[in-house]
Image (cartoon, grey):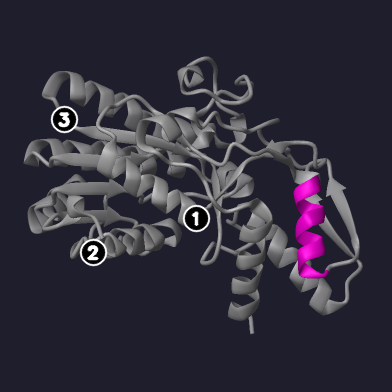
Amino acid sequence: MTEHWAGKRVVVTGGAGFLGGFVVQALRARGAEQVFVVRSRDYDLVDGQACRRLVTDTRPDVVIHLAARVGGIGANQRNPGLYLYDNAMMGLQLLEQCRVAGVPKVVALGTICAYPKHAPVPFREEDLWNGYPEETNAPYGIAKKLLLVQSQAYRQQYGMNSVVLFPVNLYGPGDNFDLETSHVIPALIRKCITAREEGRGEITLWGDGSPTREFLYVEDAAEGIVLAAERYDASDPVNLGSGEEITIRDLARQVADLTGFAGRIAWDTSKPNGQPRRRLDVTRAREWFGFTARTPLGEGLRRTITFFEGQSR
């Protein structure tokens, strides 16, 4: 329980989703009694009128904007226009209606996909504009980076208190395990367990396994978001991550070991690798609002695997 949330009305867009559910839990654990979980069937945030109705209906003290249209490399390649438009419009319209209504605090989520393809590693926030994002998810990344431009412009012109956080790839219980749209960890878990159960001796993965990625356990991400809502009041971008880097090849072997899949991992090099390396500098989050990731990758993977096996029974 914290006094900060006492009596506050909090809106969480995407609050019924993977990350949103953990953010809502974290808010309630801190004593937030009025948490409004926004679902797309009730408020289509791509529609400006729906955004206006949301803010009018809930009269929030804090808006945490997590709603997004997301997917892995394949989904981004199939839907570049959709991912650009929907994510850009959700952010533009929601922040505008929050400004008009005088919402005291807005926390919005960007993405690591906003960083330039060849940003120096570890990615530092000041490098966000030093190049074009990796091509397979650039439209999505640029749409989310637009939130940062809007936040800074609205703070400068209107004094709006908005914060934009840039998380790495998230994973954990409740993730999306649909192979058509999932990210790498849930896809790996599903492929390994399915092959194990079917007695197959091989799985095929995209690329050559050389890219590196950083992952943040979903409960840790929720903690970082809530801490930023409590303690951070500026529009400078802030990374959210673990600061640890692993190759996709090593990640695949670790998931295979944890799931009991003993077969061969084949690499389809006709498929794209995505961005060559990803690791964040997490200094700002630690120094500016006291966030440090707590869940080691191995432990997070075990929890996620246990969840998936429980769901698939």
Which badge, 3 or 2, is on the more N-terminal residue? Answer: 2
Q: Are marks 2 and 1 in contact (CB under 8 Å)?
A: no
Mark 3 lies on residue: 160
Q: Secondary structure at mark 1?
A: helix
Which residue is under mark 2? 42
The amino acid on which the numbered mark 1 sits, given as a three-letter code, is Val
Q: Is 128 contained in the magenta span?
A: no
The residue at the point 33 percent across, 49 percent down is 226
Q: Identify whether 177 is placed above or below 76.
A: below
Q: Is residue 15 left or right of residue 173?
A: left
Q: Residue at x 38, y 28 (%)?
A: 237
Can you give x and y, in whole percent of width and height, for residue 189 in the image?
A: 70, 63
Callouts 1 and 3 close, C-beta under 8 Å:
no
Give the amino acid at mark 3.
Met
Horizontal arrangement in the rendering, residue 203 relative to residue 45 (left or right)? right
User: Which quadrant: the C terminus?
Assistant: bottom right
Front in this rendered view, residue 63 or 203: 63
Tell us which disc is closer to us: 1 or 3.
1
In magenta, the rendered stretch is: 250-260
Between marks 3 and 2, how big is the CA–CA gap? 26 Å
Residue 300 left/right relative to 67? right
How packed mark 1 is, by other alpha carbons closer than 10 Å (few <14, some 14-19, many 20 or more), is: many
Relative to 81, is 160 above or below?
above
Hey, what amino acid is under mark 2?
Answer: Asp
Question: Residue 273 location, x and y as percent?
Answer: 73, 38
Q: Residue at x 28, y 43 (%)?
A: 229
